[in-house]
Image (cartoon, grey):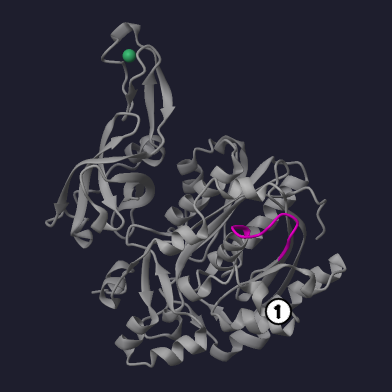
Amino acid sequence: MPHRSSVPLAWRRFEARYRLVGNRCANCGTVYFPPKAICPKCRRKGKLEKCQLKGEGKVYSYTIIHAAPSGFEKRVPYCIAIIELDEGPRVMGEVVGDLALLDIGARVRAVFRKIYEDGEDGIIHYGLKWELV
Amino acid sequence: MKLDGKVGIVGYGCYVPMYRIKVEEIASVWGEDASRIKNGLLVEEKAIAGDDEDTATIAVEAARNAIKRASIAPEQIGAIYVGSESHPYVVKPTATIVGEALGVGNDYTAADLEFACKAGTAGIQMCLGLVKAGMIDYGLAIGADTAQGAPGDALEYTAASGGAAFVIGRKDVLAKVLATASFSSDTPDFWRRPFQHYPRHAARFTGAPAYFRHVGGAVNFLLEEMGMKANEFDHVVFHMPNGKFPLRMAKMLGIEKDKLENGFVVSKVGNTYSGSSLLGLCATLDKAKPGELILLASFGSGAGSDAFAIEVTELIEEKRELAPTFEYYLNRKVYVSYARYAKMRGKLKE
Ligand SMILES: [Zn+2]
């Protein structure tokens, strides 16, 4: 069961995984997701603040998965994409919805979904996926 | 249970998964006559959750829409109640997953509720009480389900997935809740024991002694309290286990059929259990005009009904635009085969 992950580790990541909370440098305005510890552009002059991303963006690049890692077999074929968020950062995630609309540049919005289950008796991991709109 | 005329709905939102299966598709698998079933149930197709959706994800999507309409910060919510009979965990609340996903913080009370298909309306009553008592500013009540019928059972044609969420408060109310009344009794019309995958029901017993007695009873208690007649309401929403029951209930109460029209969601999405009457209320609020009166009555097997008298305010017109309507979700659909449906909903077990 390669996905059986640590419960405390999953729990510490809820904020980023559930809500797309990143950070924004008050000095240069760059938005980071996942949040960074320091602004690489401004270094010591940077000032990072929590920032709620809107959850809208477009498909930057994608691939269709036919041979899935263990735990995801039932979902094939599915689409993993790099999403360019309207605020700038790029994130990787699964694209869901009517895949007939899938294309580079297609608009997507964040939706709350089940990512995987740690077997029949483990915790359920939730997070964001990207629905074509 | 009379209220002060100030407490009510400040935000509402719904969510219906995008997958649909037609009655014809299910009937062809079991060798049944689809047109006879459609005429009997008044259901044409039903909504199915994807394999990455469950009651928690449906609740979160509906709640996000409700909060958009409420135009409040999630941290202002003081209570979260999720009513469902398909909570993803037996032990571990759905309500806290919703709270975390919305960013409510930690300063809130929460619980999962279970009362067959009426747990969502019970959550609304609890929020109304807490707000009226001044204990919280805003409460979030959700009804959501991913209902399933056993393969080949008549329930398979109707058991559907969906949900609706309501932010209850007293500031900027888009619909005042004037009064609420309930009718409850110990009636074993439908049940599911621990470790059982599918529910059982007492077939014909679900009608007269269960649905009609309880919905009719709650509505009559409400009308008595309000000193009103049933036909004084502009819109009516009853729990929709199928299309026939709410129509017959309306006839029994002397309500014209067309008053059910806006909230008659069952024919295209099926019975979404705890989401059913609440999705109907969302669809009705999407269309209602300021000053109109809505009669809502849920039904939960086991059994009980919660009835509400709701008056739409001026704010409805601007707030309705702030989130996707029921019609948006109705038109966002992809049809699936029975085989794909069985795979998605885990009906295939080795
Ligand atoms: Zn910077």
B147 or B312, nearer to the observer: B312
Horizontal and vertical percent position of residue B87? 47, 60
Kindly give the residue lying farthest to the top in the view shown: A45
Horizontal and vertical percent position of residue B171? 72, 41
Residue occupying image coordinates x 51% and y 66%: B85
* Left or right: A92, with B278 as reference point: left
The answer to whether residue B16 is visible is yes
Residue occupying image coordinates x 28% and y 40%: A58
Give the residue number, with chain letter if any, for mark 1.
Answer: B256
Instruction: Tell whether position B244 is magenta.
Output: no
Kindly give the residue lying farthest to the right in the view shown: B227
The answer to whether residue B196 is visible is no
Question: Which chain does tag 1 point to?
Answer: B
Q: Which quadrant contains ligand 1?
A: top left
Residue occupying image coordinates x 32% and y 47%: A129
Q: Main secondary structure of the magenta part?
A: loop
Q: Secondary structure at mark 1?
A: loop
A118 or A51, nearer to the observer: A51
Horizontal and vertical percent position of residue B192? 50, 75
Horizontal and vertical percent position of residue B256? 71, 79
Q: Which region shows up in magenta?
A: B285-294
Q: In this rendering, is residue B51 above or below B130? A: below
* Left or right: B318, with A24 as reference point: right
